[in-house]
Image (cartoon, helix red, strand yellow):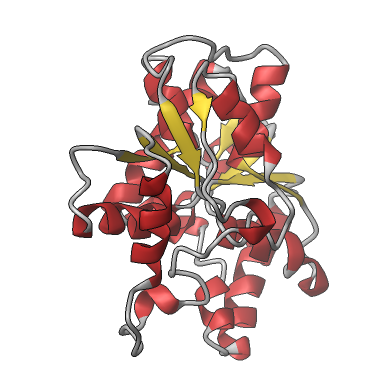
Amino acid sequence: MNVPTMAEMMAQGKQPEVLFWVGCAGSFDDRAKKITKAFVKILNAAKVEFAVLGTEESCSGDPAKRAGNEFLFQMQAMTNIEVLNAYEIKKIVTACPHCFNTLKNEYPELGGVYEVVHHTELLKSLVDEGRITIEGGEFKGKKITFHDPCYLGRSNDIYEAPRDLIKQLDVELVEMKHCKSNGLCCGAGGAQMFKDAEKGDKEINIERTEQAIEVNPDIIATGCPFCNTMMTDGVKITNNEEKVDVLDIAEIIAKNNKL
């Protein structure tokens, strides 16, 4: 698997088409690493000139900011901005909507101005340009429902890119009763994933999983590593592991294309 770092590319006098911002989850969480690998396989198959920062990438600062620690957020952000600007990065892609939202909307006021795209947007561009094809394959005829990540959908109005990709797989896209701008949070956002549960009758991820199960899908598709974890836990807790899989859009495409 070819995963060049920016340092390696710069040493060769090259500049990538896009920098892949892996994020903390994609780098360290065992489940999210599978999403990272799937996306890299697609980039390699499409012959995209990309690079990662490797050990020079730090946390985007999203958890610190959501938890209210603005000082820590700005320290983390400025560390990253110095690295990104030193490499003269113009375009960034990430599979994490939390990183996406932070890099796109909160870094500019600190001097980090880049074109930032979510991996579903880049994947759609690759399909539209004919650099990868996804029609047919092992998912043909399956029922897939898509869970809208909060920072992808409501925060940045990206609803159609992941759905367009799903539709081109020759599958049946089924929508939950709460979707798009009315979508329900998986329960992980705002650094809630790192807190103990608050008092209530039901965990948010269980409520959301039950909404997904209602439409009887074969696959619950996501576009966020945190949503993936929460929905996977929900599927396990509701005893639906043998009935439905939880997969990222990149994993679906990589598996469909046997990458």
Closer to the camera in the image, 42 or 197: 197
Closer to the camera in the image, 230 or 106: 230
Query: Residue at (51%, 58%) from the top-left corner?
Result: 57
Residue 228 visible in the shown view: yes
Spot occupied by residue 127 in the image (x, y as percentages of width and height)? 65, 19
Spot occupied by residue 47 in the image (x, y as percentages of width and height)? 58, 18
Residue 79: which quarter of the image?
bottom right
Spot occupied by residue 102 in the image (x, y as percentages of width and height)? 65, 65
Residue 46: which quarter of the image?
top right
Q: Is residue 117 left or right of residue 251?
A: right
Question: Is 173 located above or below residue 137 in the figure?
Answer: below
Closer to the camera in the image, 73 or 188: 188
Question: Is 66 located above or below residue 25 in the figure?
Answer: below
Question: Is 174 located above or below residue 100 in the figure?
Answer: above
Query: Residue at (49%, 49%) from the top-left corner?
Result: 22
Q: Is residue 147 left or right of residue 84?
A: left
Q: Quadrant of the C terminus?
A: top left
